[in-house]
């Protein structure tokens, strides 16, 4: 259990703050990811401070009990399920102090001591999108994963695709639906989307875990799909249908630069029309992950080359998962880059690295060690 007494923390081991939960619609998936990472961190090498962020944005001290963060049947975990106290935690954006402070109502602030590195396991807005990364840069606290630019650009599918195009990387056709455009001239939006041909995929521009996505087969269903996506993000992206195999590849930064894992393939079954939330996360979903994917040596080399090129184009750091379509003509098209992919032992990213020779505990340790070595943003 964590110490709320206010006794300062003294240890020769680096102290890792595992931060998870958050305000996005991916709150529960972040909790599941955190449970796996907490179980894997080498406690003889690191001290661990689990910090949950509630759906209201409040930072809370939570119990160090990974089992309580697992999906139980159809029940998804929340930070409040494991909170030791609802008293807010404070980390100041002050580079001269890294202390975590507990603010109990009617009591003097309690210091929990300094942290050496943050492992941010937040998915989606208010965590994976550069906001938390910017705060940690201000505070000069090292953290795992990509910096502000890469996090923000990878979260916003419109700008991610624009960067791919600028770097000459293959990307699929799309249309962006901005709030003012949809409100002022929905007919023009419908016309732009129709030019892509049907079916199309309507998505929140800045969300993940397949939240708010609809496959639309006809123009009559477009409005409802846009409104569903707008429940998660006022900006919407509509992608043209690409027919082919879904291939994913992990990128991990080593001391000599980024390396790509063996690629894997997603085979969606169980009556799911595409790789939606249920097909990704719920039990008995009918989805199969082929690790490694059945590709030729030339195809494997090409997808690994493109994965590293996308990683570099977005200025990613630490880790990323790059998702592709292998089209019927044999060409690869980049779908998206995830700077904090699903991270349970059975998730795609750890699975491809397991198959490449880096097991889950080593993967966690490599990421923390790299973050501790990395200088402030303007120095790297």
Image (spheres, rainbow, N blue to C red):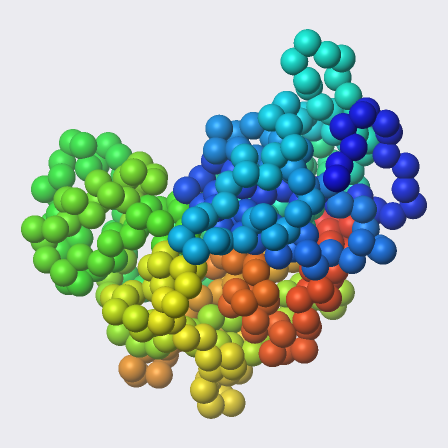
Above or below, 290 against 142 in this view is: below
Name the residue at the left extreme: 220
In the visual, does 138 lie left or right of 69? Answer: right
Q: Residue at x 62, y 57 (%)?
A: 36
Residue 165, image quadrant? bottom left
Q: What is the total number of numbered labels drawn onto the structure image?
A: 0
Q: Quadrant of residue 368?
A: bottom right
- What residue is drawn where x is 55% and y is 38%? 81
Answer yes or no: is residue 217 visible: yes
**Residue found at the far top of this picture:** 106
Quarter-of-image position of residue 45: bottom right
- Whether residue 309 is visible, yes or no, is no
Residue 4 in picture, x, y percent from top left: 76, 28
Pinpoint residue 174: horizontal percent, then vertical percent: 27, 56
Q: Residue at x 70, y 59 (%)?
A: 40
User: Does 11 sit above or below residue 367?
Assistant: above
Residue 349's x, y, as percent?
55, 66
Q: Position of residue 115 (x, y in %)?
A: 78, 38
167 relative to 72, above or below: below
Q: Nearer the viewer, residue 130 or 230?
A: 230
The one nearer the camera, 149 or 72, is 72
Q: Furthest residue to the bottom?
A: 296
The N terminus lies in which quarter of the figure? Answer: top right
Q: Is residue 208 above or below residue 366?
A: above
Q: Residue furthest front?
A: 73
Q: Residue at x 31, y 76 (%)?
A: 244
């Amino acid at each position: 259990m964590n110490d709320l007494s206010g006794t300062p923390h003294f240890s020769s081991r680096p102290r890792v703050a595992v931060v998870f939960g958050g305000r996005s619609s991916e709150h529960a998936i972040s909790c599941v990811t955190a449970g796996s990472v907490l179980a894997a961190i080498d406690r003889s090498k690191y001290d661990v401070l689990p910090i949950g962020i509630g759906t209201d944005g409040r930072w809370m001290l939570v119990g160090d009990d990974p089992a309580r963060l697992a999906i139980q049947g159809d029940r998804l975990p929340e930070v409040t399920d494991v909170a030791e106290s609802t008293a807010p935690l404070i980390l100041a954006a002050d580079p001269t102090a890294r202390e975590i402070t507990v603010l109990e109502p009617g009591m003097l602030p309690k210091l929990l001591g300094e942290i050496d590195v943050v492992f941010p396991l937040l998915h989606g807005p208010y965590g994976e999108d550069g906001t938390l990364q910017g705060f940690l840069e201000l505070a000069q606290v090292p953290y795992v994963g990509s910096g502000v630019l890469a996090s923000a650009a990878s979260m916003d599918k419109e700008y991610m695709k624009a960067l791919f195009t600028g770097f000459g990387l293959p990307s699929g056709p799309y249309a962006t639906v901005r709030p003012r455009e949809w409100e002022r001239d929905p007919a023009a939006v419908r016309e732009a989307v129709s030019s892509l041909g049907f079916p199309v995929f309507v998505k929140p521009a800045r969300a993940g875990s397949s939240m708010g996505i609809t496959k639309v087969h006809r123009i009559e269903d477009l409005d409802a799909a846009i409104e569903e996506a707008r429940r998660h993000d006022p900006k919407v992206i509509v992608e043209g249908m690409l027919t082919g195999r879904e291939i994913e590849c992990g990128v991990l930064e080593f001391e000599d630069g980024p390396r790509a894992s063996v690629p894997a393939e997603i085979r969606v079954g169980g009556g799911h029309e595409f790789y939606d939330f249920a097909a990704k996360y719920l039990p008995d979903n009918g989805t199969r992950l082929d690790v490694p994917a059945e590709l030729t040596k030339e195809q494997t080399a090409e997808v690994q080359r493109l994965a590293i090129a996308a990683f570099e184009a977005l200025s990613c750091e630490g880790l990323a998962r790059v998702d592709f379509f292998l089209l019927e003509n044999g060409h690869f098209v980049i779908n998206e880059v995830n700077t904090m992919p699903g991270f349970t032992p059975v998730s795609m990213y750890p699975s491809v690295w397991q198959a490449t020779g880096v097991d889950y505990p080593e993967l966690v340790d490599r990421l923390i060690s790299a973050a501790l070595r990395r200088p402030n943003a303007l120095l790297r």
